[in-house]
Amino acid sequence: EQPALQRLLNAPAGKIDAIRLQEYRAALGDKEGAIASLLALVKNEDSDVRGSAATAIGRLGQSSDEVVCALLSLFKDEDRSVRGSAADAIGRLGQSSDEVVGALLPLLKDEASDVRGSAATAIGSLGQSSDTVVSALLPLLKDEDSNVRWSAANAIGSLGQSSDTVLSALLPLLKDEASNVRGSAANAIGRLGQSSDEVVGALLSLLKDEDRSVRRSAANAIGSLGQSSDEVVCALLPLLKDEASDVRWSAADAIGRLGQSSDEIVGALLSLFKDEDSNVRSFAATAIGRLGKTSVDVILALVQWLETNPEAPGAGDGVDVLRQLAIAP
């Protein structure tokens, strides 16, 4: 008996969507044949078909010069959704070149905001940075569309090319009205790794943001930048009790990375060994392990805690930390 997918392939063309048909075909192993058919569909007179074909090509993930050339031709399509789908597909395929990046740059000024966002995302995914690329992305940080600002900040963070100009452009976004933009700006600043009192101060204000993802991103960025102080650690400690578990573990990770230990800090981290979330317990244990490499007092506190709480959910994590510290050079 024929498998269901094979029966679909043998069905009359009018009974199944042309794009879906090629995706089934690829799933059955004929990816090259599917790509060839999709390449023909990107020239279809129907813009919905052209856009869907581009999206399908991106999902299949099989790049070639022919595929890239076909997608680049769609960058000048009269339909905005087709241009956006082509940019998304190029980003997914990951085959970068000066030609590809050069073709994406004009789309950053496209009249359609979704196309501008897709182009920025694709550039970030391709990872080919230059002064020209970064300079083209910076104006999008002030775009009227919050999703474009979000995409541009993510792309700049992914490219990793920092400068005072880039940082100065990102800092205002930490106060953006859109929470996803605030979070992406914090992530980008953390990835760029260029710290200063101004940068850290701006990130600290986000630790009290109403959006959990922003609080998490700010904590991650602070941990990545590594600029520790009593003020920074004191601002992170309340997040160890945050209602959101991902915020708790991000704060624990940041504290561990900053490397500043005290009885209060160690006690707060050890309390997370009883957290209901296993990820929180794991990150707390990792933080304790980092601090224990430079402080015997941390190790002693961990031993005492384990003796007192042998049945706690995180006791196993604590034992693993002691074992790692014991064999560390």
Image (tube, rainbow, N blue to C red):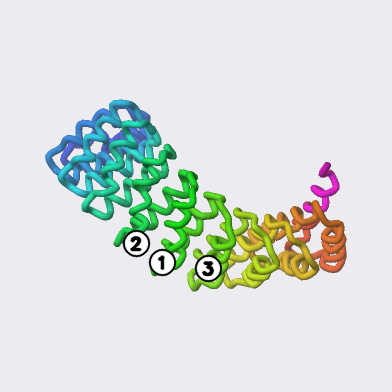
Above or below: residue 235 compared with residue 21:
below
- The mark found on residue 146 in the picture is 2
Locate residue 126: give its quadrant.
top left
N-terminal of the pair, mark 2 or mark 3, is: 2
CA gap between label 1 and label 2 equals 9 Å
Residue at x 42% of width, y 48% of height: 155
Image coordinates for residue 108, horizontal then vertical, percent = 29, 47
Q: Which residue is mark 3?
A: 206
Let me know if residue 324 is in the magenta part.
yes
Of the image marks 3 and 1, the number of the one nearer the N terminus: 1
Q: Residue 328 appears at what percent x and percent y?
A: 82, 44
Residue 171 included in the magenta stretch of the image? no
Tell me the amino acid under the disc marked 1: Asp
What residue do we see at 49% from left, 47% from top?
Answer: 162
Dot 1: within a 10 Å radius of its alpha carbon, few (fewer than 14), some, or many (20 or more) residues? some
User: Where 14 falls versus 263 (above or below)?
Assistant: above
In the visual, does 201 lie left or right of 70? right
**Where is residue 264 shown, x and y percent of the image?**
77, 70
The segment highlighted magenta reads 321-329
Q: Secondary structure at mark 1?
A: loop
Q: Which residue is mark 1?
A: 176
How would you rate the neighbour count of disc 2 (Cα within 10 Å): few for under 14, some for 14-19, many for 20 or more?
many
Q: Amino acid at mark 3?
A: Leu
